[in-house]
Each structure stands twice: as structure tokens, then as C-alpha cells.
Image (cartoon, grey):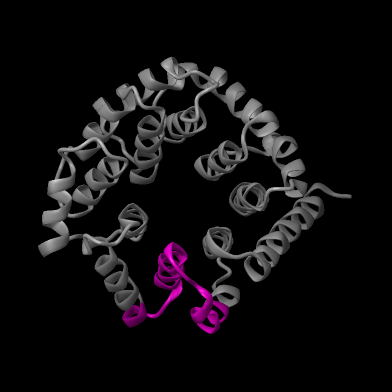
Amino acid sequence: MPAQQDHNSLLERSLEILRTSFSTEQGWVKVHAAEALLNLGDRAVVYPRILDDSDSWEGSHKIGYWRVLANCAEPHERSDSLAKIEETFVDSEYPLRLTALESLCKLGFAAAGPALEKLRGMISGSSPEVPFAYWALELSGEAGMGEKVASLSASEEPSIRKLAAFVLRWMRCQEKGALKKLAQAAAAESCESVAYPFVLGATLALGAATEHSEALAGGVAEILRNGSNEGRYEVCQALQYYFRREDLWMLTPLLEHSDPDVRIGAAAAIGTLVREKLA
């Protein structure tokens, strides 16, 4: 089979996995499949179905529903969805404010009024919300937040290091001081740590440690072969736009993985690779 035909078949297989996951899965897995399809330009599949499915989302998954709708909706629906997520974030009684804050940040929300005051009050603590609060403050016009997030990559808590790297990647941070701290974190992070896939993925995606990129790439291959399901999904997400033709051998077997998020991550990465670099 000619290479281009083979790549097109792989793209169609990946899209079918994402469409099936979006149709059959529930909760955040469904959200992840929807967002992958949107990134690959499949709005025509996602938008009508998400509208028809509005009543089946509950709890934190409702925030996921609003996030997907905001990403593919008409302007007035996007504003409505953002307002609903913001309302849950400013509600002090809401138990899942971190989920709401993460979604606001991913949607590029610029806070004002009560939401902005709440963000400023959050950064003095040491909770998992802090790196997201810094991200939200940057989106609201405050400078130098990347380096503040990067400072958290030296935390003694692996969960905080993990979230700091995740946020830096999503911020597409290019502050020199922040990237230096991230590179230092990557050199120090144990491969046994839950933070490792996140720190590694962010370091490579942001170009924070080019002199060690080959060694880090070996770590990526090991995660895709033998890492946790969460780690595999994160690496696929982090390096979605950085994988190369020669990486297909690592990604393709994951299309058959038992975990739906791993399948979604691999399908999204392969779809992006084929469309962006192999078309």
C-alpha cells in the first residue's frame, strides 16, 4: 500500500475511534473525544449531538458539556456557556471550583469583578487551584504569571508539580525564567513520579530543554509503552503537534488500548500528525 494511502487509512481509523467514543462514552471521556474531534475540524459531528444531549450531563460533567458547547457554538451560546461556568466558579459553596476554573482557563476567559477578586485571593495558598489561578490572572491581563507557575514545579508535592507543568503547557509559556525552571524540574523529576509525564511533556512541547531533548524523547517512548493510562494520555496531548512520522510506531498500538482516554489521546495525536505533517 502506498504510504499516503496508508496514512489516510490511519487518519480515518483515528477519526472513527473519536466519533465512536463521542457517541458511546460518558462524562469526561466524552468531553475529551469531543474536543479532539473539534481540534481536527469535525464540528459537524459534535455540535448537533451536543445540543441534543444537554439533559444527560450531571455534576462536574455539566461543566464539560458547557466547555464543549462554548468551543463549537455560535457566539451567543459561547457567552452563555462561559457565564454558567463562571457562576459555578464564584460560588463558594460549589465543591468543584477547580474544574470550573480549569475550563474557564482553557476557554481563554478574562476574569473581572467577583471572579477576578476570587482569583487574587487564591494565589496566597498552596492548593491545586493556585497554578490555574495564575493562568487565569494572565488571561486577565497580569504579566509574569508563567514564572510564578514555574516556581511551583519545585514543590515537594508531586501533584502540584504535575499541575504546574500542565498549566505551563496550556499557557504556551515562553518566559525564559519559567522555561529554565521547567527544565530544572524535568532533570530532577523521578520517572516513578505521577508528575513525570506532565513535566516531560511540557518540557518538550515548550522547547524548555533542547540540549536534553533526545534523552527526554526516550522517556516519552517509555511512557507510551509502559506508563500509566493518565501518563499516556497526557503525553499524547502534550506532544500532539510535535510527534513525527517515525513516532507512528509508538502511537498506532494505542488505538487498540483498553482505556478509552488512551485511545482518544493516540487517535488525536495520529490525526494531527497525518493532517499537519504527512498529508
**In the rendering, at what x and y percent does residue 100 appear?**
33, 59
**In the rendering, at what x and y percent does residue 161 appear?**
37, 30
At horizontal 17% and vertical 51% (from top left) the residue drawn is 119
Number of on-image labels? 0
Q: Which residues are magenta?
A: 48-77
At horizontal 29% and vertical 45% (from top left) the residue drawn is 129
By secondary structure, the bulk of the magenta-drawn segment is best described as helix
Residue farthest to the right, as pictured: 1
Quarter of image, res 109? bottom left
Look at the image and tell me whether residue 233 can be seen.
Answer: yes
At horizontal 72% and vertical 63% (from top left) the residue drawn is 16
Q: As drawn, is 22 to the left or to the right of 187?
A: right
At horizontal 10% and vertical 64% (from top left) the residue drawn is 113
Residue 130 belongs to the span the image colors magenta: no
Quarter of image, res 167? top left
- Give whichever of 167, 171 is nearer the camera: 167
Quarter of image, res 172? top left
Q: Is residue 122 positioned above or below 202 on the image?
A: below
Q: Is residue 165 positioned above or below 269 on the image?
A: above
Q: Is residue 78 positioned above or below 18 on the image?
A: below
**In the rendering, at what x and y percent does residue 50 appear?**
53, 77
**In the rendering, at what x and y percent does residue 163 appear?**
38, 38
Residue 56 belongs to the span the image colors magenta: yes
